[in-house]
Image (spheres, rainbow, N blue to C red):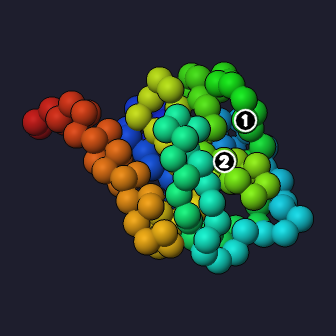
Amino acid sequence: MRGVLDAGKPLFGICFGNQILGRSLGLGTYKLPFGHRGVNQPVIDTRTKKVAITSQNHGFAVDAPLDAPFDTPYGRAEVSHIGLNDQVVEGLRLLDRPVFSVQFHPEAAAGPHDAAELFDEFVDLMSAQPAPAAK
């Protein structure tokens, strides 16, 4: 993960990828008293305030400040998504690099397609990167 971050490559972490990104940014993780299992878990996007109904299957969460951007070894970051049932971090976003992650499963279409735009966002990040030089 740190190699990808160092290279400045676009990254979209899903589920455990959110926790790995968090750890790579210097954040801790902790065991939830009751894991998030199944569908119909409401999650809010902190920028748009849109609520997505998500599918989840995790027992750990990232420990990050919910209320403001914070500094990491890779620049500033923010919590991008928060679980509405228990205020758990459900996503991270780097503000200075093309990197974001979510703890839930947007590919599972729990809502039925509430989080599908996350894949479009990742495609946009990849498209904005300069093409590799020819060898």
Give residue 46's position: percent from left, percent from top. Answer: 58, 38
> Quadrant of the image for the C terminus?
top left
Residue nearest the observer in this picture, 3 or 33: 33
The reply to whether residue 128 is in sight is yes
The reply to whether residue 18 is in sight is no
Circle 1 sits in a helix, a strand or a loop, which is it?
loop
Query: Residue at image x 21%, y 30%?
Result: 130
Give residue 76's position: percent from left, percent from top. Answer: 59, 23
Give residue 134's position: percent from left, percent from top. Answer: 10, 36
Give residue 58's position: percent from left, percent from top. Answer: 70, 68
Q: Identify residue type, mark 1.
A: Leu
Q: Tell me whether circle 2 and circle 1 mark residues in contact (CB < 8 Å).
A: yes
Query: Residue at image x 75%, y 58%?
Result: 85
Residue nearest the observer in this picture, 97 or 44: 44
Label 2 or label 1, whichever comes before in sequence order: 1
Q: Is residue 130 left or right of residue 38?
A: left
Q: Is residue 98 left or right of residue 21?
A: left
Circle 2 sits in a helix, a strand or a loop, which is it?
strand
Q: Identify residue type, mark 2.
A: Ile
Circle 2 Cα neighbour tier, 10 Å, few/some/many (<14 / 14–19 / ≥20): many
Residue 2, quarter of picture: top right
Furthest residue in direction bottom, as rendered: 38
Which residue, given by chain and number where applicable, does mark 1 sit on? Answer: 66
Residue 31, quarter of picture: bottom right
Structural distance between the alpha carbons of marks 2 and 1: 8 Å
Query: Residue at image x 49%, y 38%?
Result: 48
Relative to 58, is 134 above or below?
Answer: above
Relative to 67, is 125 above or below?
Answer: below
Furthest residue in direction left, as rendered: 134
Q: How many marks?
A: 2
Residue 82: give its label: 2
